[in-house]
């Protein structure tokens, strides 16, 4: 009876600990209702159009244009960028490419997904996708790990004959993330997310002179940036300690027996 009670307590604690882990593995929440999806794209890093995760941005352009968007990714997220390019009615075979950079302008490799695809002649559209590695809260200075902050998306056509340049196209871009949780937790965090200045504004001083100051990106994840120190790994560590203590108590209960055997005399006799 005592062993059954110990095992039942251990299973109950393990079930309670599994609840936050299951929540961390769910896809990211739907986009906030506060703003509408953007309908245009930037033409450089500095003019990249800000995009919230879960929104579907649209933009019109021409073959040969460089189209830029930016989004925020926090520690523990695994972002996936998807893009669809609707091509003109008649066109030659062309190759489209989707690139992603972090806040330090370091190009991030795709963990999986077709980031470069060739559309056959007269194809109606081409779909691209890039799933990044899990964003880490901290990394070594020499590493190229994705870190919390602003990420830039560039969509463009490559290897295109000059006769095909300038034809109208329409694009759709969407970013979603999967929350990995404590499985990707590291010991450390950045002092600030990597959100570099994206523009400069002019301000007039009292003496009539003007000065320019950087404007930081206003985009951030829903609920703000995480602190970087908490993850469900703390829960699993605590539950592991409790289970180890219960295992020790159970082992002692199994091995201690019911007391001194009757045929063994007490000490001193």
Image (tube, helix red, strand yellow):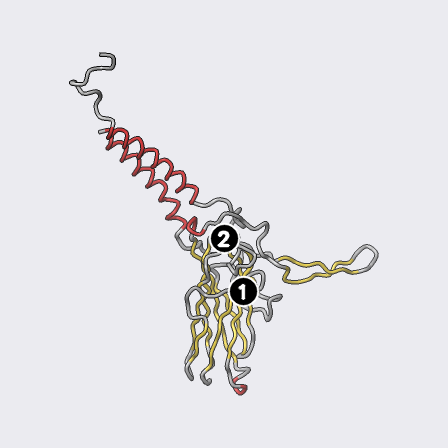
Image mark for residue 101: 1
Q: Secondary structure at mark 2?
A: loop
Please determine whether, in this image, residue 201 is positioned above or below residue 117.
Answer: above
Residue found at the very far front of the displayed protein: 269
Q: Position of residue 104 (x, y in %)?
A: 58, 61
Q: Residue at x 50, y 81 (%)?
A: 159
Q: Quadrant of the N terminus?
A: top left
Please determine whether, in this image, residue 213 is positioned above or below residue 45.
Answer: above
Please determine whether, in this image, residue 260 is positioned above or below residue 155.
Answer: above
Q: Position of residue 202 (x, y in %)?
A: 73, 61
Q: Secondary structure at mark 1?
A: strand
Residue found at the very far left of the displayed protein: 263
Q: Residue under circle 2?
A: 75
Q: Is residue 94 left or right of residue 105?
A: left
Q: Nearer the viewer, residue 34 or 21?
A: 21
Q: Is residue 112 left or right of residue 188?
A: left
């Amino acid at each position: 009876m005592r062993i059954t009670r110990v095992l039942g307590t251990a299973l109950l604690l393990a079930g309670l600990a599994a609840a936050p882990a299951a929540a961390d593995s769910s896809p990211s929440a739907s986009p906030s209702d506060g703003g509408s999806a953007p309908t245009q794209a930037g033409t450089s890093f500095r003019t990249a159009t800000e995009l919230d995760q879960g929104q579907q941005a649209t933009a019109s352009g021409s073959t040969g244009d460089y189209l830029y968007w930016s989004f925020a990714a926090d520690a523990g997220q695994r972002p996936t960028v998807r893009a669809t390019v609707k091509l003109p009615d008649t066109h030659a075979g062309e190759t489209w490419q989707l690139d992603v950079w972090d806040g330090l302008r370091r190009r991030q490799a795709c963990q999986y997904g077709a980031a470069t695809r060739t559309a056959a002649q007269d194809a109606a559209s081409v779909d691209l996708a890039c799933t990044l590695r899990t964003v880490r809260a901290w990394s070594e200075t020499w590493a190229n790990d994705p870190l919390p902050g602003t990420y830039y998306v560039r969509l463009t056509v490559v290897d295109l004959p000059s006769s095909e340049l300038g034809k109208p196209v329409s694009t759709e871009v969407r970013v979603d993330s999967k929350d990995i949780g404590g499985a990707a937790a590291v010991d450390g965090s950045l002092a600030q997310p990597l959100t570099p200045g994206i523009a400069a504004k002019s301000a007039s001083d009292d003496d009539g002179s003007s000065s320019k100051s950087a404007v930081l990106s206003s985009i951030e994840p829903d609920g703000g940036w995480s602190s970087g120190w908490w993850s469900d790994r703390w829960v699993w560590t605590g539950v592991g300690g409790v289970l180890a203590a219960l295992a020790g108590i159970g082992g002692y209960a199994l091995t201690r027996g019911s007391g001194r055997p009757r045929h063994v005399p007490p000490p001193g006799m």
